[in-house]
Image (tube, grey):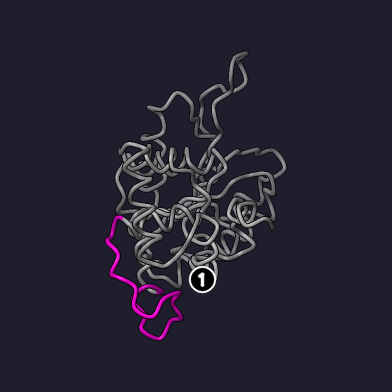
Amino acid sequence: MNAQSSDLAGSTECEPTRVLIVDSHTIVREGVSVLLAFEDDLAVLGHAASVAECVRDAAYLAPDLIITEIDVGGPDNVEELRRAFPASLVLVLSLLDSEEAIRAALAAGAHGYVLKESGRKELLNAIRTVLEGTRFLCERASARIVSRFLDDGSAARPTAAPSPITRSEREILAMVARGMSNKHIARMRERSVRTIEKQRAMLMRKLGLRNAADLTRFALEHGLIPAEQADRSAQALGA
């Protein structure tokens, strides 16, 4: 286990988020560590080459957020980390962009999924979104999952022949399904709240839906997100 030398205990002000990085590749671990070193609100607690290494040292580690791969070890990595660190959030950083890999990671308990090809901005956005309590899928991962059930001719749809939806609308659908507000979506997409409201309304018209709850239910019924992980969506549906 590689611990960082920065002193995290001396501050009497707001403590930075403690981050643990788990990846089999040294260059990835060190690269993410360097990237996070520029962020005042984030502090790398340490990094490890394997989940087993982290679990071994679990007694004295207390990460707020764990960034881990599933490239080696698969979704079992997430499950083991959740068991060893039940109070920690888990963000997957992976080379794998298949629908199966993304769904497996989320089902195992991951709070977010980012591809290793993502840039610095998207990774930091993912970290802060997850820390705010909202699940995060990077743009490509969202498009991969949403495209599957929207483009599959065998899938059940709410209308006989809905109009094609744009890539932007697909991304918004995925964000709504994760319980994100218009304000949050606007901030992530660097658009005005009014623009997001218009796109969301157009999406609902195309799909024949009446309100946000219907939109969320549509995503849940078509398998965009597991029902048990859609905390905010469940609240919107009155669950």
- Would you identify the image quadrant in which residue 63 lies? top right
Q: Which residues are magenta?
A: 149-168
Graded by Cα atoms within 10 Å as few (under 14), some (14 to 19) or many (20 or more), the crowding at tag 1 reads some
Residue 122 shown left or right of residue 109 in the figure: left
Q: Residue 44, percent across and down?
A: 50, 34
**Identity of the residue drawn at 46% across and 41% down:** 127
Residue found farthest to the top? 12
Residue 32 shown left or right of residue 229 in the figure: left
Q: Is residue 158 magenta?
A: yes
Residue 5 or residue 96, whichever sits in front: 96
Look at label 1 and name its amino acid. Answer: Gly
Residue 5 or residue 237, whichever sits in front: 237
Q: Residue 103, percent across and down?
A: 50, 67
- Would you identify the image quadrant in which residue 14 lies? top right
**Identity of the residue drawn at 34% across and 54% down:** 139
Q: Residue 222, percent across and down?
A: 49, 72
Circle 1: element type: loop
**Identity of the residue drawn at 38% across and 74% down:** 148
Which residue was labeled with disc 1? Answer: 223
Q: Residue 207, percent across and down?
A: 40, 67
> Residue 175, relative to residue 97: is it above or below?
above
